[in-house]
Amino acid sequence: MTVEEGFIFPDGFVWGAATSAFQIEGAVDVEGRKPSIWDTFGPARTDGNIACDHYRRFESDVTLMEQFGLQAYRFSVAWPRVLPDGVGKANDSGLEFYDRLVDACLEHHVEPFVTLYHWDLPLALHKRGGWFSRDSVGWFADYAELMVRRLSDRVKNWITINEPQVFLSHGYLTGDHAPGANHSFGEVLQAGHHVLLAHGEAVRRIREFSKQPANVGFAPAGCINLPRTLNRANVEIARERTTGVSEKHLFNNVWWMDPVIRGSYPEEGLRKYGKNAPLHLDSDFEIISEPIDFLGLNIYYGHEVAIEKGEATETRDQPNGHPRTSFGWPVTPEVLYWGPSWLYDRYNMPIYITENGMSNTDWLNIEGRVDDPQRIDFLKRYLAELHKVITDGADVRGYFHWSFLDNFEWDKGCRQRFGLVHVNFETQERTPKSSAYWYRDCIESNGYTILSEAHR
Ligand code: GCO
């Protein structure tokens, strides 16, 4: 059966799941690791320092991944575990952990996709200015080089930075994420410029030191607006918003993707940000736009927009009864159609959905199972939209569900459960949810079961 005829995804489509170091590893103060900015921030002091104890339990977790058919596992390296001071002397125990993790993945036929930065900045570097210092570019590039030299004989898929919009905004503007700072908008845009430079320098080090041809990308948040109805004006305003810049916040796509893929900041952003736009050297964009192989998109939900009486109006609140996750996020499957569609049109760059999922009030029922029909329905709806955009011609190469395990959800601690596998944070017992079984069948059939009778 071809892609067009059924819900079959293209041959070679990669089915995976994603996590990040600080959200699952625990073991924050063992075998040489030193603190990150998250270690002493908010609920991390309790929930984050153990999380899913993956540092000790990774073997059985990877075995579970194979049992549930995962073809790929997106995880991040904890920078302060391998370079405790952020720079300088590497920590062999930390490097050996990632050796063992990668070896376990390969032994269990799970392809590793390694994220280099998923928010756990070494505290030592934060104290030296962190991303606000242009030195951060070299610090990150040296760290990337260390990891590529160590792992690239076995790892070919690399993601440099996860969601610059989110960690810069929550960490340094509003302060609800680590390190809980409140800088000016202009200062944070300048730090964002250093993050983009760091991305580019890391790509250069990966290309130079990888022991095999590397597949390199980055994973910005996909900030998607949806047309409230499918009339032309609403589709156009939704596209404009999705490929535009608001002067009020950092949550857009093109300010972060244009420099990396097109080699310049978007004109609209430079105009709207005005004096807040970062100082830069013209040569910076040569570094930032070092060619990558794919655009990762972390997409969860979007807000509808429409033209009413000549004005663009955005829906911030869906009607009562509209499906919502336990985070209160609206379930809006069409984001996996419109987002990849418009961003593929803009960049013509292969895409991986590097994160998509939902938090749910999952618990063990009286029979000891975790039934999560909401997540199965979520998966069916979102994957059906992703299939549609692929059928329309977008080159989407894989899907990583967020997340494999219930884990530490930043400032919300371990209360928001995103996993395909339930974690009892007291006993660390893992219980695959019914969605894990559904996802296994979906992977085995390369998507065919999404809307088949068997799963209605
Ligand atoms: C993000 C981060 C993840 C989150 C997940 C659920 O996208 O915010 O990459 O670390 O845990 O998205 O919020």
Image: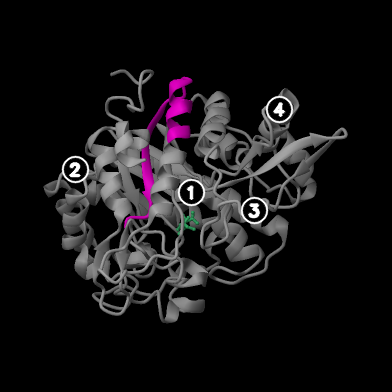
Q: Nearer the viewer, mark 1 or mark 4?
A: 4
Q: CA distance from mark 3 to mark 4?
A: 31 Å
Give the residue at mark 4.
236
Q: Nearer the viewer, mark 3 or mark 4?
A: 4
Q: Which mark is residue 338?
A: none
Q: CA distance from mark 1 to mark 4?
A: 34 Å
Give the residue at mark 1.
198
Q: Which mark is residue 153?
A: 2
Q: Amino acid at mark 1?
A: Ala
Q: Amino acid at mark 3?
A: Gln
Residue 19's spot in the image, x, y percent? 36, 56
Q: Amino acid at mark 2?
A: Asp
113 on left or right of 271: left
First to last magenta residue range: 384-404
- In this view of the protein, can residue 197 be seen by the observer? yes
Q: Magenta stretch: residue 164 in it?
A: no
SS label for mark 1:
helix
- Look at 52% across and 72% down and name the residue there: 127
SS label for mark 3:
helix
